[in-house]
Image: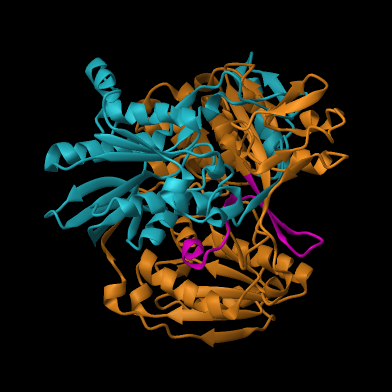
Amino acid sequence: MKQVPEVAEVKINPETGTLIRDGVPSILNPFDEIAVEAAIQLKEQHGGEVIVITMGPPQAKDALYKALAMGADSAVHLTDPRFAGADTWATARTLAKQIGKMKPFDLVICGKQAIDGDTAQVGPEIAEFLGIPQICYVRHIELEDGKHVKVHRETDEGYEVVRARLPVLLTATKGLNEPRLPNIMGIMKAKKKPLEVVDADTLGLPEDEIGLKGSPTTVRKVFPPEKRKGGMKIEAEDPREAARKLVEFLAKKGVI
Amino acid sequence: MTLLYDRETCTGCMLCIKVCNFGAISKDGDKVAFDLDKCVLCGSCEEVCPVNAIEIERRTVDKEKIAEYRDVWVYCETTDGRLRNVALELVTKGRELADKLGEHLVALLIGYQVEHLAEHLVHHGADKVVVIDEEVFKDYTTDAYTIAVTSLIAPRKPAVVLFGATNNGRDLAPRVAARLGLGLTADCTGLDIDDERQLVQTRPAFGGNIMAEILCPYTRPQMATVRPNVFKPSEPDPTRTGEVERVNININPVQVRTRVLEKVREITEGMRSVEEADIVVSSGRGIKDPSNLALPKELADLLGAAVGGSRPIVDLGWLPPTQQVGQSGRTICPRLYIALGISGAIQHLAGMSSSDIIVAINKDPEAPIFEVADFGIVGDLFEVVPALIEEIKKLQATR
């Protein structure tokens, strides 16, 4: 899971074209919240243990506490300045190294994508590094017999029913569940649950596989998006008149 | 940390503060200070610093090795034995990139009973089509497709590989990238070749609030997934010729660890795909009640349009997710986009602002949708749309 800025509240300074991030709250990525909820529901139905893992700066532990408050059993926080600047490849490499140490596991569940980067790449990349199958954009999960999972995977036309043997990595999308709000008891318990902090030395990956140095991609430049210019705007005091003008405009443009 | 700042060398010109898009640099006495929690190591400050006081530690590039990689490859997705639109968009864009590099464009066609589609790819610009046509590829599975793609690109060494940023493309490409240790840029909306023959990949981030240019300087092939409906497919040229190479890939059934049991289409009868329609009539929160969707549907039927919606009404379950337009839904570029009661959050605009003509009808004169609309009507959609339907009927009667 990942802590992300609430992107809906990120604004652009119109004069400088820079992101205004001050005062923008950090939240647990909404798709990851769905993933955490799915894990907790599976534990409630079938037993087991839910461990949440994040990589991020020290304040990302707030996101871990939220997941613990929802009902996860323990947390691992991969945090080290040397992890900074990681692209999806280096992020997945780092997370997979930690997950690999925690074998055996049945399921790895990630959010479909983070709302700040929107790449949807870290999940599949983790699965590849772990050598396990993946099923992305999952909306429904059934554990069949303790050995197999049957899921509904969203496609561009609808969904497909896919079956795989555990262990498997799933990425969660909207519609899988409605994540619960942590209650007071959960919030109080969360602070007492185990939270392991892991730095780059403990993780044990070479420095050229983590952070910016381990990232095959690099950001050359960032810039504000080009703005489309608006055209005419009319007040519909008389809806008929407004509709007539619009039809005239569209007919002239040849689109109707 | 990988950003190194030499305070001694710094002259305090403050140029870096001006170019930082993330507000990560602030004045610190007569010098500057970096807030590394905000910094994304984009390198804008490093580039602008006149005295090289800022350095970002990066990997080194092996130029000789990189030069061995040639040609632009595009992965052409099929569904139920037909090409997806994005395949032709990629072939068109790939042609342009290959011409800039002076190299070949190779289309990679994988599926079952798809070989006959190869000539379309040639007509749209491919020099060569590599076809893998076997029953194991009938349904998309991550394992079978990853084996096919990696076993071709690893020995043949293309410089660039592009995938459509569809659900399947975004499942496959990262798996390939991880297996081969390659950089991959997600959901690009712009692609170009720079002076050093590198692929420049432009993509939105932070919910469309900012654009980033990404490079893969160290690894080859450079890989990207490309957002559908951003590049327009070229007109086919039936006189174009190209080579078609059939390749067999041996896949053992145990290598495919997921099985598709059933496929369910949710684009319901009478509901057109927003991605493929020329005209899209989209509704937002201003529609107030699901029963009111009859109004946009009537307008859409009249125009032969698809019915779309913004995220809030899809979240409420008033329309299926396949009809959602925006950053977390579909990105579309129809000839005409009609936004009814949609305020125009940046996430929505990210999905439709490349439409040819945008019409907005909204009660709130301050709604951001008007900033991008070619024709905006400030008014009650429940009054304007019925009048609009009348006027269109009148016009159609005269034809």
Q: Is residue B135 above or below residue B222?
A: below
- Left or right of residue A199, residue B332 in this image: right
Q: Which residues are magenta?
A: B176-203
Rendering colour (chain A): cyan
Membership of B267 in magenta stretch: no
Expressed as whole percent of the image width and height from the top left, the position of residue A81 reads 55, 39
Q: Is residue B140 visible?
A: no
- Quadrant into which the N terminus of chain A falls: top left
Say above or below: A3 vs B248: above
How are the colours assigned in the image? by chain
> Is B169 above or below relative to B39?
below
x and y percentages locating residue A93 in the rendered image: 46, 54
- Outermost top residue: A237
Numbered-mark total: 0
Q: Is residue B250 above or below residue A75?
A: below
Q: Residue B95 is drawn in which quadrant? A: bottom right
Residue depicted at 63% across the width and 51% down the height? B230
Q: Report the chain shown in orange.
A: B
Q: Position of residue B246 (x, y in %)?
A: 50, 86
Q: Residue at x 77, y 74 (%)?
A: B102
